[in-house]
Image (cartoon, rainbow, N blue to C red):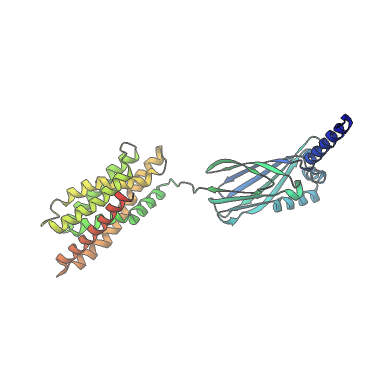
């Protein structure tokens, strides 16, 4: 190969690669997305010299107050950016445009307000300015929500990004009371334990002593666990709760006078159940006043739910215990509790 021919080849290759680079010149945009409650703000910043000349002129004119340019850019913005939250589209509102007076040394800024129908769920952002900023446009985006901050890239191959926005933790008095009520009324093992205790009770005074002892006990361990003073893994507590159900049910079936010391068993086993209740608060990182509200409110909710259950279950047990049911009803209830407790014990020990 002659030197002259080699120079021609080198020149042609250089021209080819330069052409390729120019053909794929990329516009880089900077995007900031802020979600506060159900309000979302989308802000795009681009360097005017880097975008197509027609778009740069439009942005510059809009930034300087040209009404027709403002309407054109605003319409383009609403078509280019689509946002969904929780499966529902957010409604685009006002569009603000700002920038310099010259395309030689200026940045263009487009800000869009959105209103969403919720505050949490899956946030999906479609960012496609290709028709306005060029087919090779891409953006570096910073998304800030109540769940934290995340950086993403909207590129030529991916114009969509989806992230999960967690439900904010409610920490008011009523929120914790509601949580306590829900926890006890959906905690079937706790309710079955109470049913087994009530099935062996004899008279109103016995019921009061049993419920009071159970309340005091689980309040103590719930508080200790929430404060971090006691920490026993669920893999130990959950099987123990099932074992307490079996114990009380078998005592009902075997003992001649199961209610004589029932309040003592109620207190002792209530300490175990309190550690089970604490798991609901353990999932929430609470400190200071929020922790106080959690302990008082959650405890109050548990007692309300417990009282509702006793008010419903006790009259039914009393009604079914008339006549021949005086011995039959407690035995049937205790056998059912023992069977269910055994099932839970096996499941929690061997299946986790």
Q: Is residue 146 left or right of residue 231?
A: right
Residue at x 49% of width, y 47% of height: 168
Residue 59 showing in the rendered view = yes
Q: Residue furthest top?
A: 3
Is residue 31 rendered to the left or right of residue 167?
right
Farthest bottom residue in view: 323
- Residue 160 position within the rendered picture, expressed as x and y whole percent measured from the top left: 63, 49
| Residue 302 place in picture, x, y as percent | 32, 51
Taking the image as drawn, is residue 73 in sight?
Answer: no
Q: With respect to residue 49, does 344 lie above or below? A: below
Left of 14 or right of it: where is 81? left
Give residue 92's position: percent from left, percent from top: 66, 53
Residue 107, compared with residue 342, is above or below; it is: above
With 236 as the anchor, is 3 left or right in this view?
right
Which residue is farthest left? 256
Look at 19% across and 49% down and name the residue there.
Answer: 265
Rendering coords of residue 202 (x, y %):
15, 59
């Amino acid at each position: 190969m002659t030197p002259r021919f080699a120079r021609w080849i080198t020149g042609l290759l250089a021209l080819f690669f330069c052409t390729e680079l120019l053909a794929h010149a990329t516009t880089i945009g900077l995007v900031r997305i802020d979600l506060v409650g159900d309000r979302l703000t989308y802000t795009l910043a681009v360097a005017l010299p880097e975008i197509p000349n027609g778009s740069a002129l439009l942005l510059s004119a809009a930034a300087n107050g040209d009404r027709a340019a403002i309407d054109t850019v605003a319409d383009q913005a609403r078509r280019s950016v689509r946002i969904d939250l929780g499966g529902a589209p957010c409604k685009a509102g006002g569009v603000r445009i700002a920038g310099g007076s010259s395309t030689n040394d200026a940045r263009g800024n487009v800000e869009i307000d959105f209103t969403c129908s919720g505050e949490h769920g899956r946030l999906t952002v479609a960012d496609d300015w290709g028709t306005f900023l060029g087919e090779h446009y891409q953006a570096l985006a910073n998304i800030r929500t109540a769940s934290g901050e995340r950086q993403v890239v909207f590129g030529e191959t991916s114009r969509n990004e989806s992230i999960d926005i967690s439900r904010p933790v409610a920490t008011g008095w009523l929120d914790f009371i509601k949580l306590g009520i829900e926890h006890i009324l959906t905690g079937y093992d706790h309710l079955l334990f109470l049913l087994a205790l009530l099935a062996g009770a004899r008279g109103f005074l016995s019921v009061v002593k049993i419920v009071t002892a159970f309340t005091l006990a689980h309040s103590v361990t719930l508080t200790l666990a929430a404060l971090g003073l006691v920490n026993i893994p669920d893999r130990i507590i959950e099987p123990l709760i099932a074992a307490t159900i079996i114990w009380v049910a078998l005592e009902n079936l075997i003992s001649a006078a199961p209610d004589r010391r029932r309040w003592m068993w109620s207190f002792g086993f209530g300490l175990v159940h309190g550690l089970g209740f604490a798991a609901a608060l353990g999932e929430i990182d609470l400190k200071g006043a929020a922790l106080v509200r959690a302990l008082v409110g959650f405890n109050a909710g548990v007692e309300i739910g417990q009282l509702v259950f006793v008010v419903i279950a006790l009259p039914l047990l009393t009604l079914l215990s008339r006549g021949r049911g005086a011995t039959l009803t407690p035995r049937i209830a205790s056998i059912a509790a023992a069977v269910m407790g055994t099932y839970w014990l096996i499941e929690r020990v061997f299946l986790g």
